[in-house]
Each structure stands twice: as C-alpha cells, then as structure tokens.
Amino acid sequence: MVGKNYPPEFKADAVALYESRPEGTIGSVTPDLGINPETLRNWVRAAGASPPRGRQMEEPAQPPAPLKVENAALRKKVRERRRNARSCAKRRSISPGLSPFQPDRGAVVLVGAGCTERRSSW
C-alpha cells in the first residue's frame, strides 16, 4: 500500500484543528479531514502538541478501610486453616485411621486441635 504525501500546511492545519477542539479526540477529527486516525496521531506526536486525548484510565477506587480489615481477618483465618490441615495430614500419615471404605467396627473418633482422627478399638 502506497502512503499519501500531504503538504506541510495541511499537516499543520490538521494538528491545529485537533488542538482547537479540547473535547475532540483524534477519531472524531479525522473523518472531517478524510485521513486515517493513525496519520493524525503521528502528526500530533511529531508536532509535540498536547498528548492524545480520548479514553483516559481513571484512578482505581481504593477499597474502604472496613473491607481491608475484613479481608485481612479472612486471610488470617485461611492461613490458620491451611496450617491446621497440614498438621492433621502429618498426624494421619504417621498413624492412619480406618479407611472410609472399611466398616466402623467400634471406631473411636478423637477430636483435638481441629483434627478429626478415627481409631479402631480393635
């Protein structure tokens, strides 16, 4: 594809038109001129004019302080439960109880430190 050559006066007028419309975007100015938006964007950059306008990223809203406190408490609870689950898994690997497929022939359920262990009475 062959690029078009525009006279310097046209380029300067296009950049001036863009700058004269404070609320206008490159995409809203280019249809009036009959040029590609990227062409005008390049001219604006080359002219060192104001930075391109358009969709601006807004600052993300900071979550309210009570939510931060609640999230911290929930994260702490999750860490404690994970730690507890690891210690329970270690205990079960040392002395495994009945498997879930065996009948409960007088099994005793011991609850301690948040772990539930099943031990056979025979």
Image (spheres, grey):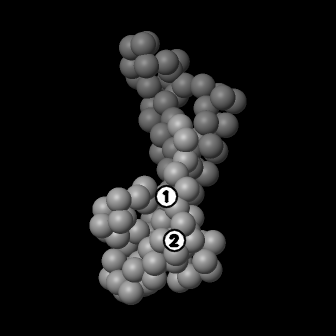
* Residue lying at 54% horizontally and 66% vertically, measured from the top left: 7
- Residue 31 lies left or right of residue 51; in this view the side is left
Q: Nearer the viewer, residue 39 or 101?
A: 39
In this view, 28 is above or below 85: below
Q: Position of residue 25 (x, y in %)?
A: 37, 72
Q: Amino acid at mark 2?
A: Lys
Residue at point 63%, 72% (across, down): 46
- Report the number of numbered marks: 2
Report helix, strand or loop for mark 2. helix
Which numbered disc, 1 or 2, marks the residue closer to the eye? 2
Is residue 40 visible from the viewing direction of this image? yes
Estimate the x, y position of residue 27 in percent, counting from the top left: 36, 64
> Can see residue 113?
no
Cα separation between marks 1 and 2: 13 Å
| Residue located at (54% from left, 25% from top) | 97
Disc 1 crowd rating (10 Å Cα; few below 14, some 14-19, many 20+) is few
First in sequence: mark 1 vs mark 2: 2
Residue to which mark 2 is pinned: 11
Residue shown at 49%/58% (left/top)? 38
Name the residue type under label 1.
Glu
Q: Is residue 88 above or below residue 82?
A: above
Residue 62: percent from the left, percent from the top? 43, 80
Residue 65: numbered disc: none
19 lies above or below 120: below
What residue would you read off at disc 1?
A: 38
Q: Residues within 10 Å of mark 2 (few under 14, many from 20)?
A: some
Spot occupied by residue 13 in the image (x, y as percentages of width and height): 46, 78
